[in-house]
């Protein structure tokens, strides 16, 4: 297989594995020891040859085969193997997409009301009280144009949460060790879509 094809497969697999495993670019960087720039360059197709050590760190992080991550389409493979897939009989949930600048004033509105007044995207999974947030600024490992799918409200689950920093009046992503005096939690980040995809 040509190097460019292998890199394209790697890029697509990373995007799919991040989404399907409930991970984020940030968690991938933090846990694998790779820099944000390295991951960004791979995902943006700016690298033709990815170092073997980088590929090994990524495949180890996701717990997948080092040789398969460049050669197999994981989304296709897992969709065929899975009974709950976008091609199955599960109805996707309609999720309203709210611009970052309109988010705070929209928080007290019901999802049904937001779904009528905002554009929609679809989320495959169990969805109740779920919104999409269209980013207009860089937030952690995400950039303008990315959409964060967020389950509104506080949950006891571990994982990343979208939060509003009261002092700066800006959105950020926090872990479980946030300070409730400093942040207002919007909800759990359950999926990331890069540049709205």
Image: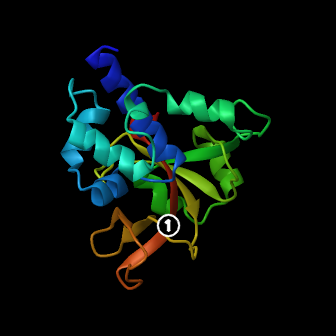
Please tell me which residue is depicted at 30% across the width and 43% down the height of the picture. Answer: 56
Residue most toward the right? 89
Which is more toward the observer, 99 or 141?
141
Q: Which residue is mark 1?
A: 186
Q: Quadrant of residue 151?
A: bottom right
Please tell me which residue is depicted at 47% across the width and 66% down the height of the picture. Answer: 159
Visible in this render: residue 140? no
Q: Is residue 22 left or right of residue 83?
A: left
Placement of 65 over or under 186, stated as above or below: above
Q: Quadrant of residue 156?
A: bottom right
Q: Is residue 83 left or right of residue 61?
A: right
Q: How is the image coloured?
A: rainbow
Please tell me which residue is depicted at 29% across the width and 75% down the height of the picture. Answer: 167
How packed is label 1: few (under 14 Cα within 10 Å), some, or many (20 or more)? many
Visible in this render: residue 6? yes
Please tell me which residue is depicted at 20% across the width and 35% down the height of the picture. Answer: 51
Placement of 5 over or under 185, stated as above or below: above
Which is more toward the observer, 40 or 73?
73
Q: Position of residue 68 (x, y in %)?
A: 43, 32
Total labels: the figure holds 1
Residue most toward the top? 2
Residue most toward the bottom? 181
Q: Quadrant of residue 83?
A: top right
Disc 1 element? strand
Placement of 185 over or under 103, stated as above or below: below
Which quadrant does the N terminus fall into?
Answer: top left
Q: Position of residue 117 (x, y in %)?
A: 61, 44
Q: Position of residue 166 (x, y in %)?
A: 34, 75
């Amino acid at each position: 297989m040509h190097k460019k094809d292998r890199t394209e497969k790697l890029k697509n697999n990373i995007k799919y594995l991040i989404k399907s495993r409930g991970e984020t670019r940030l968690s991938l960087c933090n846990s694998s020891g790779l820099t944000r720039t390295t991951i960004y360059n791979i995902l943006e197709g700016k690298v033709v040859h990815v170092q073997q050590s980088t590929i090994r760190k990524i495949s180890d992080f996701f717990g997948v085969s080092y040789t398969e991550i460049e050669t197999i389409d994981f989304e296709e493979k897992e969709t065929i193997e899975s009974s709950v897939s976008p091609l199955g009989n599960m109805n996707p949930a309609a999720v309203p997409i709210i611009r970052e600048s309109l988010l705070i004033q929209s928080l007290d509105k019901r999802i049904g009301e937001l779904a009528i007044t905002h554009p929609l995207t679809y989320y495959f999974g169990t969805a109740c009280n779920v919104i999409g947030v269209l980013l207009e600024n860089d937030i952690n490992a995400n950039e303008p144009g990315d959409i964060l799918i967020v389950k509104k409200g506080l949950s006891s689950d571990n994982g990343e949460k979208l939060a509003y920093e009261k002092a700066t009046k800006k959105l950020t992503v926090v872990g479980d060790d946030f300070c409730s005096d400093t942040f207002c939690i919007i909800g759990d980040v359950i999926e990331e879509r890069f540049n709205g995809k």
